Amino acid sequence: MTDDEAQELGITESKEHATGEWYAEVVQKAELADYAPMGGFIVTRPRGWALWEAVRDFLDEQFRATGVENAYFPMFIPESYLEREKDIVEGFDPEVAWVTHGGYDELEERLAVRPTSESIIAPFMAQWTRSHRDLPLRLNQWCTVVRWEATETKPFFRTKEFAWQEGHTAHATAEEAWEETLTRQEQYASVYEDLLAMPVLRGRKPEHDKFPGAETTVTVEALMPDGKSVQGGTSHDLGTSFAEAFELTYTDEDEVERLAHTTSWGLSWRALGALIMTHSDDQGLVLPPTVAPTQVAIVPIWQEDTREDVLEYAGEIAEDLEAAGIRVELDDRDTRNPGFKFNEHELHGVPLRIEIGPNEVEDGEATLVHRPDGESVVAEREGIVESVEAAFEEIYDALYDAAEANLEANVREADSPEEILGTIGQYGGYVETGWCGDEACETVIKEEIAAEIVMVPMDPEEGPIHEECSICGEPATETAYFARTY
Amino acid sequence: MTDDEAQELGITESKEHATGEWYAEVVQKAELADYAPMGGFIVTRPRGWALWEAVRDFLDEQFRATGVENAYFPMFIPESYLEREKDIVEGFDPEVAWVTHGGYDELEERLAVRPTSESIIAPFMAQWTRSHRDLPLRLNQWCTVVRWEATETKPFFRTKEFAWQEGHTAHATAEEAWEETLTRQEQYASVYEDLLAMPVLRGRKPEHDKFPGAETTVTVEALMPDGKSVQGGTSHDLGTSFAEAFELTYTDEDEVERLAHTTSWGLSWRALGALIMTHSDDQGLVLPPTVAPTQVAIVPIWQEDTREDVLEYAGEIAEDLEAAGIRVELDDRDTRNPGFKFNEHELHGVPLRIEIGPNEVEDGEATLVHRPDGESVVAEREGIVESVEAAFEEIYDALYDAAEANLEANVREADSPEEILGTIGQYGGYVETGWCGDEACETVIKEEIAAEIVMVPMDPEEGPIHEECSICGEPATETAYFARTY
């Protein structure tokens, strides 16, 4: 290996001092994604796509268990269909990629590459819904969508095309639609908490930041180590506004025609951005074992005379782990030394390394090294599967605990504009404060510092944290969480 | 239920006498797909998409087991990238949907919505391949692609946007690339034979019908009941032509820079079209249990006084089946009578119906009715899971056998243009004949009847079936299979 190669392999940026550059470097060097030739697009490599598949499989199982069926709608939406939505929403016009030509011919009507699919899905839901017996109707699709935003590309966080799922449901009553909205929020929280080792805050968006046309938008928010909040997934109670626009009605048991109540909800590969950002470090990617494409890398360490024994012993352990359903790689490359392999597997985010040398063979043991903190444990050959599984749990818990500690230490109270600005400026994180509900008060803060109200707590019983709005002094109606965002 | 509703529920067209209309009706009434507002596009409903997911899961497992990794590349390809391919291929220009505007602005360079992704994937494969240690490189993506063909829409067979997987691999040697090409062909054959209950013929495409730039294109071909052949999946040995165009080289062990050998291979949702067309009948959809979203429909039959007992008994059977991993629906709707339910589940292609009335409860039995042929068997309550699983196998085999009988009865020999035309005109199916290899001889047939050479057998040992080309009389070099196609 030349110096150039060594340089190329390692992470050179610092997570603490140059978070953005460090993030971009981890994404590329851990081989998660590369930049496409067109600005705003990325190529998702197998290691990155496997993470998205893990999220998909996890969420898809929860969707199925709660009555959701997958479908697939066209990637193009006629302009006139998007227009129908305009009664409700301002529309995605400034962000839409337009197909104008098919082959050599100009199309009679422009087609939007879907920025989201309400306007093509709702008419079909209307067509398929006749009586109360057809409800609830719960559809979901896994796809990519395109939004032509001209901001700087940040893989998984900001790309013109991104992967997501979009769920669309119709219900007979407002109560059911609200229950649905909360079910999906809780499933999104579960993605973070039970799969990605990250605690999240549950809340609703302030009135002025709801999905256009929604009664209520609820969100899960994750705090990054750099003090910014990531909107981790949103779920919208759309009331009857889309049902009205698209004539989505049903005949009730009493033979009366009624408007359905609809919801929509989406989680995108931004979840991967949050995952990478949260756990990784200056050695590269860190992943919880739940989603790691390779969970264990076995690195045999041999001299010429011990080679055969070490490889045989390592191979048997690999077989045992594989038989137990563990995703294991036996790294028996002749062309790389153990040190190189250690670094590479650390860079790639393999959660557990097993080192096996002649001593381990002789003693019937194996050395397990945890990726996140380098903790090293000697395990017996007997029961190696159980030891590895226990290590997975320890690693998961350690990652979760660290993220939770970061979250808990970074929710602060403030009760004046100066204090809000000062706290966010100095520490980042969330600042909770009394708020009158008026967007103008958010603007006061937003104009001084790039922070906004990312959520208000959901429990109406709680009441606002302060009696007065910390910005204008009027009576507070709720508690606002200010934060910088991705 | 009104007469209108009854009419709407049943299939009104005849498979034998109006195959095209019958097919379109089955697709819509079995709720597999609907037509989208833009010509050439369809909306794939949950029952249809579940079939595609079954194909995906089956094939994905085989891909993984043979070293393929999933990735995801942008849905857009810059025009200049498509142009690079033109050294090799004529290009997809006449079939490309072009994105020309992002928001309100015209793009500097038009973007093609991918018709296939060689031209965006190959440059990245080149970037990721340095040494022989990086090979073989095997990537696959599940996505949709767009080809602006102005033919009549036929769900799953002919749509402007269609779902598929596209695999792209690079290898150090020509032998490995050829082996790869055959591996994928065999996996495609397995989709049909082991999942969709359809035998296929394996062959290669004639020289003039290869994928542009390919050394060899191999195919699996399925014969439909109306005598037409469906190209079920193709796998291309691309030699070094794409490697040359995209500078995909590697440093070999001897430090020499060499061109890689690449392959690509794809299977689309056309497989679903072939599935539906092959097994379904004038009562509606017929599916093998392997892919049916609902494998068993339990229909309880009660009077007021037996209702409770029948439902309890039926519920227990449903639980047993579900616990065994069988996809079962207990159809306990109060609002529909058993006859309606029978028809509906037949229309929807549920492979097995279980009827349970008071007699079954009393005798500790259940009546199993096979969807394809109405065969009815009384099974003991004890061992119901085994009986259902045995019924699944019988149903699968019966479907496969019928398709195989159709195939075996419809490969005929002919040794003159008149005989080729007459045989295809009268019977459809495949006509095998000696061929000189010249496209002009195919054209002679094609101009008279919409039939073409769909494949030539792969085994070079076999030699041509006739000594002379049946069309021009020159020496035959291979055996051509003529057929009408979808």
Image: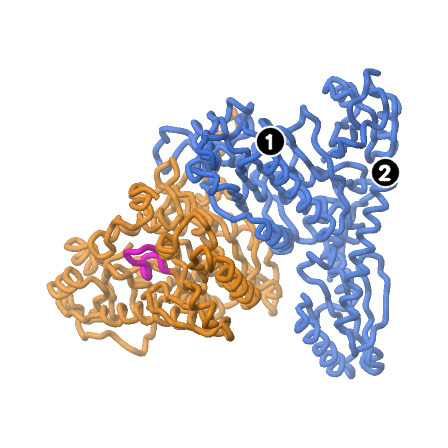
Chain colours: A orange, B blue
Please tell me which residue lies in front, B49 or B300: B49
Nearest to N terminus: mark 2 or mark 1: 1
Most frequent secondary structure within the magenta stretch: loop
Q: How many neighbours does mark 1 have within 10 angstroms: few (below 14), some (14-19), or many (20 or more)?
A: some
Q: Is residue A287 magenta?
A: no
Mark 2 belongs to which amino acid?
Asn
Above or below, A61 against B118 in this view is below
Kindly identify which residue carries mark 2.
B410
Please tell me which residue lies in front, B31 or B453: B453
Q: How many neighbours does mark 2 have within 10 angstroms: few (below 14), some (14-19), or many (20 or more)?
A: some
Across and down, in percent, residue A383 comes to 51, 75
The residue positioned 72% from the left and 48% from the top of the image is: B192
Kindly identify which residue carries mark 1.
B149
Q: Which residues are magenta?
A: A276-286
On the rendered structure, is B346 left or right of A308?
A: right
Q: Chain of mark 2?
A: B
